[in-house]
């Protein structure tokens, strides 16, 4: 980026095309809405058409919805074409879809393992692989993945999820090595404990939620708005020279 870019333009994503998986709920929905409010043209991807319709009504801006079962790996090439149909090839892809089966190690099944690693790790790679050529042609692109506390910490009942999110951290670095010379950065957000559908088991137990809050440096769990700035940073020109990194948005949980 030139040295004289106005500060107000650093986080400008207006007119960029973004695709967000898992846009129907949780942090994926938040990410899709933040990008839309910032002026990006956003394609939300999820299984539930009704939830996507609710998101579009809430987000405003230029949005489109694509319903898809991301676990169908054979359909990812078709999905890449479908998300490019409303506004053109995406400049930004945010991989927020995920699953946590919370199976203890002794009870992990091959099916649960495959579902978890497939959605959390395999799909983000192969969907990105389909979208990278158009980014390369433009000389600019942003891949934003979702890592986790469990990319670096072991939690009870989290062996499959932790394996997938540890893989996301390494895959982020490998994507950067592969594609950043073409102007495509790859980074990951690592949320701490935020209230979402995926973490309902945590927040349904007030004592457990309080213990997690006490583990942070800030002294509280995450709020939806806490993800907005870090996401815009990684999706915008502000992060032109940042790639292969996991930005922990955890209130300092992993710092202690």
Image (cartoon, rainbow, N blue to C red):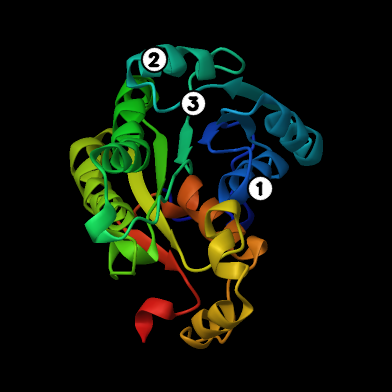
Disc 1 versus disc 2: nearer the observer: 2
Do the numbered discs 2 and 3 sit on residues whose CB atoms are within 8 Å? no
Vertically, is 92 above or below 155?
above
Sooner in the amino-acid sequence: mark 3 or mark 1: 1
Residue drawn at 70 percent across, 34 percent down: 51
Report which quarter residue 196 is drawn in.
bottom right
> Which dot marks residue 187?
none
> What is the x, y in percent for residue 39?
69, 38
Gap in angstroms between the C-alphas marked 3 and 1: 16 Å
Query: Relative to residue 66, is residue 254 drawn left or right?
Result: left
Vertically, is 77 above or below 209?
above
> Which dot marks residue 75?
2
- According to the picture, the residue beneath numbered tag 1 turns out to be 34
> Which dot marks residue 90?
3
Vertically, is 50 above or below 134?
below
Residue drawn at 64 percent across, 49 percent down: 30
Graded by Cα atoms within 10 Å as few (under 14), some (14 to 19) or many (20 or more), the crowding at tag 1 reads: many
Graded by Cα atoms within 10 Å as few (under 14), some (14 to 19) or many (20 or more), the crowding at tag 2 reads: few
> How many numbered circles does the render carry?
3
> What is the x, y in percent for residue 97?
48, 40
Graded by Cα atoms within 10 Å as few (under 14), some (14 to 19) or many (20 or more), the crowding at tag 3 reads: many
**Closest to the observer: 215 or 58?**
215
Q: Residue furthest front?
A: 107
Vertically, is 63 above or below 105?
above
Gap in angstroms between the C-alphas marked 1 and 2: 28 Å
Residue drawn at 58 percent across, 75 percent down: 221
Gap in angstroms between the C-alphas marked 2 and 3: 18 Å
Do the numbered discs 1 and 2 sit on residues whose CB atoms are within 8 Å? no
Q: Secondary structure at mark 2?
A: helix
């Amino acid at each position: 980026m030139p040295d004289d870019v106005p500060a107000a333009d650093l986080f400008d994503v207006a007119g960029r095309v973004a695709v967000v998986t898992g846009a129907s709920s949780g942090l994926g929905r938040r990410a899709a809405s933040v990008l839309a409010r910032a002026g990006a043209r956003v394609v939300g991807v999820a299984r539930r058409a009704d939830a996507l319709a609710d998101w579009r009504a809430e987000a405003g801006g230029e949005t489109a919805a694509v319903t898809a079962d991301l676990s169908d790996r054979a359909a990812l090439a078709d999905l890449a074409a479908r998300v490019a149909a409303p506004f053109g090839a995406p400049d930004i892809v945010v991989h927020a879809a995920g699953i946590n089966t919370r199976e203890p190690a002794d009870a992990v099944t091959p099916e649960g393992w495959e579902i978890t690693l497939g959605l959390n790790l395999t799909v983000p790679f192969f969907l990105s692989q389909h979208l990278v050529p158009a980014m390369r042609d433009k000389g600019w692109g942003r891949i934003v993945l979702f890592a986790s506390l469990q990319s670096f910490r072991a939690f009870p009942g989290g062996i499959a999820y932790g394996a997938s999110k540890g893989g996301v951290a390494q895959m982020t670095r490998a994507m950067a090595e592969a594609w950043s010379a073409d102007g495509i950065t790859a980074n990951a957000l690592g949320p701490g404990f935020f209230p979402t559908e995926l973490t309902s088991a945590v927040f349904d137990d007030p004592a457990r939620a309080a213990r997690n809050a006490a583990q942070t440096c800030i002294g509280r769990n995450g709020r939806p708005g806490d993800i907005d700035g870090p996401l815009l940073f990684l999706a915008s020109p502000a992060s032109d020279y940042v790639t292969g990194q996991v930005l922990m948005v955890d209130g300092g949980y992993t710092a202690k």
